[in-house]
Amino acid sequence: MLKISQLFGPTIQGEGSAAGRHCLFVRVFDCNLECTFCDTAYTWAVTDEKAAKTRSGRRYDRDDPAYGLKLMEPVDVLAGLRKLWDIQTRSTIIVVSGGEPMMQQQALFPVLQQLRDWGNEVHIETASSGNRLSKRYKPTVLAALHATDVPVPVQRVMVMPEGSDGPTNITTAQQIADAALSRGYGLSLRSHVLLWSDDPDR
């Protein structure tokens, strides 16, 4: 069973090198990180202890029908996506976000495999900023990545400003743009925030 918060779209991918492209979202429920800037805390801040780690301090309802926990079989996730868009004949990007998708790697595999078999592009979003070193530094993961001998080219690195409203997004982007460019990195604005602010369904 997969722990899901919401399935939504079509929308645009707001972040990274695919910004502006058509996509659907699978937003998983639960997270083992503690990003203070998190804009989807409704997927994990469901206790007073967890809520205290967020910027707002707000506690969310785990059983909220819109954004709370939904236990779903992989076939149900695929059926839900097909109701949003005909992903079998009109391929698109499926963004798996969270929460923290990597907490559900094994359960997600059949969904991801089927999406790829139907010709869809799959993107997985994960984060680590704002967490203590023991939560974000994983030497075994880095060693496994290094062992693949597939370095990430510098031009594939994208820097993105944090901000849940348009003006903050632009201001932060202006502050980091020169530093990113001097390193050969790309800069991705959060297009969905510029268009729809902090609407969780976009």
Image (cartoon, grey):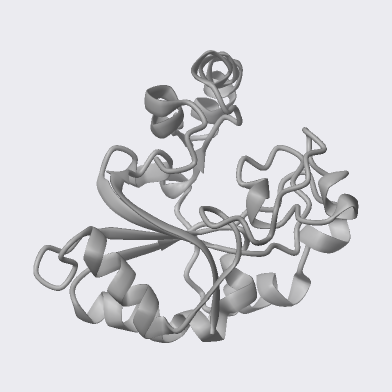
Q: Is residue 119 above or below residue 63?
A: below
* Image coords of residue 22 (percent x, y): 24, 47
Please give left or right for residue 77 compared with residue 61 in the image: left
In the image, farthest residue toward the left: 89
Please provide percent x and percent y for residue 148. 52, 78
Q: Nearer the viewer, residue 191 or 88?
A: 88
Residue 15 on image: x %, y %: 43, 41
Q: Residue at x 46, y 29 (%)?
A: 193
Dividing the image into 4 quarters, which one contains the C terminus?
top left
Give above or below for 163 relative to 7: above
Relative horizontal placement of residue 57, taking residue 166 as reference (left or right) = right
Q: Is residue 8 above or below residue 121?
A: above
Where residue 175 appears, x then y in whole percent? 61, 16
Q: Give the residue drawn at x 58%, y 17%.
A: 168
Callout count: 0
Nearest the viewer among 3 and 64 is 64
| Image quadrant assignment for residue 186 | top left
Q: Residue at x 47, y 58 (%)?
A: 6
**Depicted 24 relative to depicted 129: above or below:** below
Q: On the picture, is 174 further left or further right than 127?
A: left
Quick one: quadrant of the N terminus? bottom right
What's the residue at 55%, 54% (across, down)? 67
Query: Which picture quadrant has residue 12?
Result: top left
